[in-house]
Amino acid sequence: MIHPDIQEVILSEAQIQARIRELGAEISRDYEGSSVLLIAVLRGAALFLADLARDISVPIELDFMAVSSYGSSTKSSGVVRILKDLDEPIDGRDVIVVEDILDTGLTLKYLLKNLASRKPASLEVITLLSKEGKQRVPISCKYVGFICPDEFVVGYGLDYAEKYRNLPYIGVLKPAAYQD
Ligand code: IMP
Ligand code: MG
């Protein structure tokens, strides 16, 4: 049963879950013998984090940041604000930033610079989706779930005006579903 506002499903629930299991196994291998601090960027990455964390076998800790870059529009403003900072220091920790989608890269660029200044032992990025050819700033992202077409997508944490985050798949909205 596909949501009536969805025009096309681009990644099914099964595809997403299978890829997350692979990413979890990769991280478990790469960090064998150590522990990882996963920092999720709220709110979109929360669902990805929840599934990914359970597919990682090395010890993990979780922390959260919230930034704003979009408001409720579908275009990147380039303006990044920290709405919620981490609860714990990260100096000396092996950190992986968990993102839902890498679009222009402006949000992550700001975030990585900010986190690097806190002197973690290592700092990597995992993103579920990366929009091919859209990055305006170079971001080195060690783990990428899927390359995604340059379209606005929703589901599995990704929203349009805070809706559709609970869809278990990722899809493109019908034009009629947009309010702006
Ligand atoms: P960037 O700064 O342009 O890379 O934007 C990153 C953030 O914009 C992501 O973390 C999402 O919150 C949001 N975003 C970018 N593209 C999409 C999309 O296609 N659907 C939903 N949110 C998106
Ligand atoms: Mg986000």
Image (tube, rainbow, N blue to C red):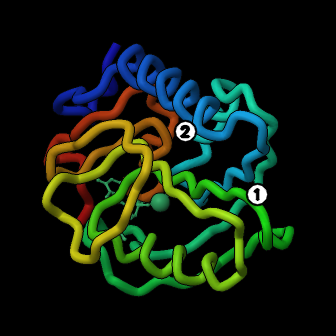
- Relative to 178, is 111 above or below? below
* Kind of residue sitting beneath label 2: Phe
Q: Residue at x 77, y 61 (%)?
A: 93
Residue nearest the viewer, comparing 4 with 60: 60
Quadrant the C terminus occupies? bottom left
Q: Quadrant of ligand 1?
A: bottom left
- Residue 109 is drawn in which quadrant? bottom left
Q: Position of residue 159 (x, y in %)?
A: 42, 50
Instruction: Mark 1 or mark 2: name the one nearer the start of the chain.
Output: 2
Q: Quadrant of residue 139?
A: bottom left
Q: Which residue is mark 2?
A: 48
The answer to whether the beta carbon of the residue marked 1 is less than 8 Å from any atom of ligand 2 is: no
Q: What percent of the width, then of the height, locates residue 135? A: 23, 67
Residue at the location (47% across, 83% down)?
Answer: 80
Q: Position of residue 118 (x, y in %)?
A: 71, 81
Q: Which residue is mark 1?
A: 63
Amino acid type, mark 1? Asp
Looking at the rendered structure, the secondary structure element under dot 2 is: helix
